[in-house]
Image (cartoon, helix red, strand yellow):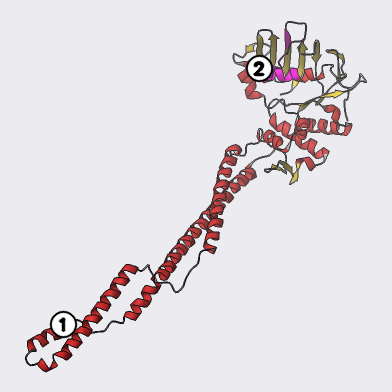
Amino acid sequence: MRIVQLKANNFKRLVAVEITPDGDLVLLSGKNDAGKSSVLDAIWAALGGAAACPVKPIREGTEKGEVRLVLDNGLVVERTFTAKGTYLKVTADDGAKQYTKPQDMLDALVGKIAFDPLAFARKKPKEQIEELLKVVDIGIDLEQHELERRALYDKRADANRDVKRLEGALAGQPHYDDAPAALVSAGDLAGELTAAEKSNAERLRTVKRIGQIEDQIRELRTEQESLTEQLAKHAELIDVGILKARLATVEVDNEKVRANERYDELAGGLKGARAAAAHLDADLKAHDEKKEEALGRAEFPVPGLSFNDEGVLYNGIPFAQCSSSEQLKVAVAIAMTANPDLRVIQIREGSLLDRESLDVIAELAGANDYQVWAEVVDESGNLGVVIEDGYIAHAPAPAEETVG
């Protein structure tokens, strides 16, 4: 859909204008504050709904403003502004059909009519990404994706901190190869030593007693046999030196065992922390790959167009570093994608464009069947549709060439 007629009365700075656009590029020229921007605002206010209407749509000193658009598919859009509010009427078939929910119908047809290619080119990289995502569906919610990525990133940072902490602790933790396999109770070992000393003393007393009663062996046979049985219970001499040596080193040995247990505990913790960090590395990589795959599937309006976390890219080059011609072509292509049904694009600061750039825009509009409305500051009085004090001071003849 294109605009074939625009009428506006008492809208913002406009008193009464009627424009029947001819060609793909409609130039709105005149001095500053003549009403050029009001023409573009009138288009957007008529189509975009209450949210798109200016705060003060009615021209100062009047009570009612009106905007009427005729589209090339037969739709007629009429919006009236009064002190009480705004009223919309949409008809078709020369007024035979009137829509009961006109704004819903327009919302279904109208894209981003306010998309301005020059404004896009001047936006910051992050803002350009936001504008681009309004017209390109990459299949994922980037905001949610970034929140999930931040959570994974924070978890991985925590895991890596655990790795560093455990690595430091393990590096300062001694380990003894000659330590016993387990802790030894000093009390048990002392008890064993006491029992051994007692046993040895008992054995010595028994041997001495035997020597004293050798002469009485016949008479004391019974006692000898009893003592012999008692001696049998202590048949071997226990080496208490070994037990004393072990008792002397038991605390040192136990400290080594405790150190080794702590070493093994830290080593196990480090292994687990490294595994957790590696797992989160893999999760983070998979999360980023999901975004890359989504971007790879996305159908961008211009071949070579993409974006990363820093901003919009064209053939791998940041948009801000592209040539002015490339920026203009890309921005116009995005604007066209944003308006697939209502094939109208606005450019508010066309004075920033040279004649060659205007020719490029006219060529792109003609090749893709779009209509571009551009305002330019010009005081010659003969460029395009000339707006002066809210009226049309000059309009080109239908066959007149405006650019090229």
Q: Secondary structure at mark 2?
A: helix
What amino acid is labelled 1 in the image? Answer: Gln
Residue 204 x, y percent position in the rendering: 23, 85
Q: What residue sits right under mark 2 in the picture?
A: 50
Sequence-earlier tag: 2 or 1: 2
Label 2 – label 1 distance at C-alpha? 115 Å
Task: Relative to 88, say whether 253 is above or below.
Answer: below
Q: Quadrant of the N terminus?
A: top right
In the image: residue 193, left or right of residue 285: left
Q: Report the side of 383 relative to 308 (left or right).
A: right
**Within the image, what quadrant is residue 364 found in?**
top right
Q: Residues within 10 Å of mark 2 (few under 14, many from 20)?
A: some
Q: Residue at x 88, y 32 (%)?
A: 354
Q: Residue 66 location in percent, x, y?
A: 73, 10
Give residue 122's position: percent from left, percent from top: 77, 34
Q: Which residue is mark 1?
A: 230
Indicate which label's residue lies in the foreground, 2 or 1: 1
Residue 5 at x, y percent in the picture: 77, 16
Residue range in magenta is 41-66
Quadrant where the C terminus is found in the figure: top right
How many numbered tags mark residues here? Answer: 2
